[in-house]
Image: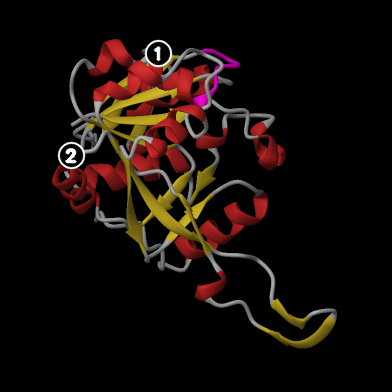
């Protein structure tokens, strides 16, 4: 089953770094968050990736074309114009990088990769979010209901404490709790190829008309995940993920 990763957006909310590189190439622990997403799927045996490129997509292409340089020790013999790669490490991946347009919306990016999917069920996620979702369980859940799409629903953790009120009176303050969180689309989706037929074109936002249509026609299911999930929208999010990685407490690191 192929894994499609959306990696073409501008990442304006983390412009401290995205003015130099696409957001999926912002590093956590010295490696792009896109790499973390792919390692996570690969842990579960999903090794064929289609990456939807857009903004500064050439940086992602360069990363994969020189991947062995990032993961190996190298000796450069300048006198002989020669390069020796030590302890070469190869991922079991097949990575297809597709330019889906600079200003294309998420739905349009998905529609553009139809020739690479064919008539197969496929996985879809964002190139900036990690979690400890059990991907095989998500796939089995999708197969069990025979609908066109499954979204992994995650809790959106709010940043602030909660104020209790009674009409206009403030009665108390308390720390935020899990019950205050709302369910949101965390990515890690499973889709049938019929999804391509309800995406109009480049200007279509996947999360709007197509998903709204699926929901109204009862073709959309939610796999609810109560564990860890975190996207990297802002510098604050990046710092949080970095802290988890550096402290060896990253829940998404399933691989060895």
Please provide percent x and percent y for residue 242. Answer: 53, 57
Helix, strand or loop at mark 2 = loop
- Residue 198's place in the image compared with 18, above or below, is above
Of 125 and 41, which appears nearest the observer? 125
Say which residue appears at 35% left-offset and 60% top-offset.
Answer: 225
**Which one is closest to the eye, mark 1 or mark 2?**
2
Please provide percent x and percent y for residue 30. Answer: 48, 46
Say which residue appears at 37% left-offset and 65% top-offset.
Answer: 227
Say which mark, if any, is on residue 112. Answer: 1
- Determine the image quadrant of residue 114: top left
Of 32 and 48, which appears nearest the observer? 48
Q: Which residues are magenta?
A: 101-106
Residue 45, visible in the rendered structure: yes
For marks 1 and 2, the one nearer the N-term is 1
Say which residue appears at 55% left-offset and 17% top-offset.
Answer: 104
Residue neighbourhood size for the residue with mark 1, other residues' Cα within 10 Å, grouped as few (<14), some (14–19), many (≥20):
some
Please provide percent x and percent y for residue 238. Answer: 58, 52
Q: Quadrant of the N terminus?
A: top left
Residue beneath disc 2: 146
21 sits left or right of 161 in the view: left
Q: Quadrant of the C terminus?
A: bottom left
Q: Is residue 199 located in the magenta-colored stretch of the structure?
A: no
């Amino acid at each position: 089953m192929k894994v499609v990763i959306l990696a073409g957006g501008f990442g304006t909310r983390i412009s401290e770094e995205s003015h130099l590189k696409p957001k999926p190439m912002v590093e956590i622990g010295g490696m792009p968050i896109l790499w973390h997403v792919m390692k996570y799927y690969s842990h579960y045996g999903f090794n064929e990736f289609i990456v939807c490129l857009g903004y500064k997509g050439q940086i992602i292409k360069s990363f994969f074309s020189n991947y062995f340089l990032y993961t190996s020790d190298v000796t450069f013999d300048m006198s002989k114009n020669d390069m020796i790669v030590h302890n070469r490490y190869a991922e079991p991946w097949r990575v297809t990088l597709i330019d889906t347009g600079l200003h294309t919306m998420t739905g349009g990016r998905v529609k553009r990769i139809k020739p690479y999917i064919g008539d197969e069920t496929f996985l879809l996620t964002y190139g900036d979010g990690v979690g400890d979702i059990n991907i095989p369980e998500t796939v089995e859940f999708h197969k069990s209901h025979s609908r066109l799409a499954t979204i992994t629903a995650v809790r959106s953790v709010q940043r602030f404490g909660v104020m209790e009120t009674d009409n206009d009176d403030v009665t108390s303050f308390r720390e935020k709790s899990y019950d205050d969180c709302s369910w949101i689309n965390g990515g890690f989706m499973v889709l049938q190829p019929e999804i391509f037929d309800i995406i109009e074109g480049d200007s279509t936002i996947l999360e709007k008309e197509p998903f709204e249509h699926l929901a109204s026609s009862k073709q959309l299911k939610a796999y609810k995940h109560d564990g860890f999930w975190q996207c990297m929208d802002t510098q604050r999010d990046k710092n949080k993920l970095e802290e988890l990685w550096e402290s060896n407490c990253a829940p998404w690191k399933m691989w060895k």
